[in-house]
Image: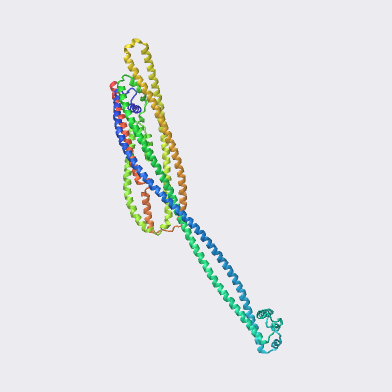
Amino acid sequence: MMKIASFLFLATRGVDANAVSPIQKVVQMLSDLEVKVLGEGKEAQKVYEEFAEFCEDKSRDLQYQIKTGKQNVAELQATITEESATIESLDTKIDQLAGQISTDEADLAAAKDIRKKEAAVFAAEDHELSETIDTLSRAFTIIEREMQKGGASMLQQKNAGDLAQTFTIMLQAAEISSADAERLTALVQSSQEDSDSGAPAGAVYKSQSGNILDTLGSLREKAEGQLADARATETQNINAFQLLEQSLNDAIKFGNADMAKAKKAKAAAGQKKAEAEGDLEVTSKALAEDEKALAELHHDCMTKASEFEAETKSRGEELKALATAKKVINESTGGAAELSYSFMQVASSESAPYASIRFIRDLARKQKSNVLAQLAMKMSALSGKDIFAKVKGLISDMITRLEAEADADATKKAWCDKELAENNEKKADKEAEIAKLTSQIDQQSAKSAQLKEQVAELNKALAAIAAQQAEMDKLRAEENALFKKSSAEMGEGVKGVKLALKVLRDYYASDKDHASADGAAQGIIGLLEVCESDFSQGLAEMISAEEAAAKKYDEETKENEIETATKQQDVKYKNQEAASLDKSTAEANSDRSGVQEELDAVDSYLKELHEKCDEKAPTYAEEKARRDSEIAGLKQALEILENEAALVQVESRRSLRSVKVHA
């Protein structure tokens, strides 16, 4: 019944209130509608079969992507586990090396301290023995010289009872110092005690002059032997220290080298782990999206199947209702038609393109196309008498524009593929020397650019959602206003029919003189009852349609709010990550030296090519598929609009001709 009312609405809009279509026109329209419903059934069957094939293909692709994604997740998790174990092993090795190096450094410091003390002891001993030898040599020389002279001092020495007296005489003669005399006395005494600890104390220093020289010579030889032994020991200690020092320095050097290698390996493992964790996050997110897409696809396909089944059933019921309506209308005559459908004369002809606008708006939401969303907004903003031509013009221009863009993209892609292939080959020969330096920068720059592009796309999507919501708000307000007006008029019609029925029933029941007219009266009353039922049913359907539209509007508004909040949060995190990457890239750039002139030239040209040719999200294949879908949808919308316009024009001409004939 709702579709019947819609076609009657299209037939009567734009027609003056005095030029209402007669019953024959309604019957013809119902017949045309039956043909249209049958055609829609065939077309719906074809569309459903294509959709079922799409569901099967898309499901197969998503299942393959999910399988591949799970394999990639498992591989990345294995890599993370492996690198974690490597990092832990290297941490243990680094700790062990640090402990060993610390021990070696402590041993080296201790050895240096011991060597310092040994050197000090040797220096003191060397000094003392050198002075002793020098003193003995001088004393020996003096005594020997005096003995050769035979002077008075020597006579005194000959009369001396022991060496002590000799040293005293030499001291008195100022031939030796008191310190030398004391040293010599102590030395002789110490030597005599070592050689004969059992001799009487008085005999220690007793000797003849010849024996004195022998004693001094013996003491000098002993001192010289001790000095030679001390110096030999010092040489051995120096050699031993140098060997130990070299060994410890080598151990520390090799330990530091091993630690540097371990730290470098740990850093490489950490970077590999971080990259794997980043890839795991992206892959897991993509896997979750694929699984979600598969679930949504399954839900959509099942929903579509249910809707198709319901539409098929509804179409059969509609055909039955159309046949019944034709029968009822054919049996109805007079002014009942005017009373039944007068409520539709107030409709505005400007609401005709709403079906195509709504179709394009739904297509834009389904395809997530900003272009179609903007087109729907432009269409909804149109007004005037020739709105059909304006809307058709917008759709035709959009189809032409999309087809031109598709041809341009295809030509550009072929040229880009050729140029990129040739110049990438040139670049490969030049960039080997700087690959290690630029790898980190390129990765971070690419990821930062990708994040910024994603942020830009998200901002565009947010703007599109806001515009879409504004358009939804506008259409909802218009639909609600139309509902209020139409439902009020329908309610008045119901009241009017009920009042007419009451008047007729009361009249014919009380006035027996009009018994001969009972048959006609009953026909009128019956037709009015049908009208009452139609009006009541139409009012109920209006209310139901309004409630459904309001519910759908609320659901879509809620979805837009959720999607907006999600995208805003995503923009926040991507901006933070991009800023961090930019900072890290700037630090890495400071470590990179100049690049060869030829590579600069190639990179400059490749940069221009990439700016022109790089496939950003969506890719060329995705963009082509999306554009083909948009073109197909626009053509379908154009066909719907043309059919709607043709129907309105045909029915309007029929209405005008009918009015002219009756006039």
Residue extending furthest top? 513
The answer to which of 383 and 283 lies nearer the viewer is 283
Question: Can residue 388 be seen in this snapshot?
Answer: yes
Instruction: Report x, y in % for residue 449.
Output: 42, 49
Q: Looking at the image, is 486 positioned above or below residue 395?
A: above
Question: Can residue 373 be seen in this snapshot?
Answer: no
Residue extending furthest front? 198
- Quarter holding the C terminus is top left
Q: Looking at the image, is 353 positioned above or below residue 570?
A: above
Instruction: Report x, y in % for residue 279.
Output: 42, 50
Instruction: Report x, y in % for residue 278.
Output: 44, 50
Relative to 218, 607 lies left or right: left
Relative to 249, 366 lies left or right: left
The answer to which of 59 and 500 lies nearer the viewer is 59
The answer to which of 66 and 653 lies nearer the viewer is 66
The residue lying at 37 percent from left, 22 percent from top is 533
The residue lying at 55 percent from left, 70 percent from top is 241
Instruction: Report x, y in % for residue 61.
Output: 35, 44
Q: Looking at the image, is 511 positioned above or below residue 93?
A: above
Coloration of the structure image = rainbow
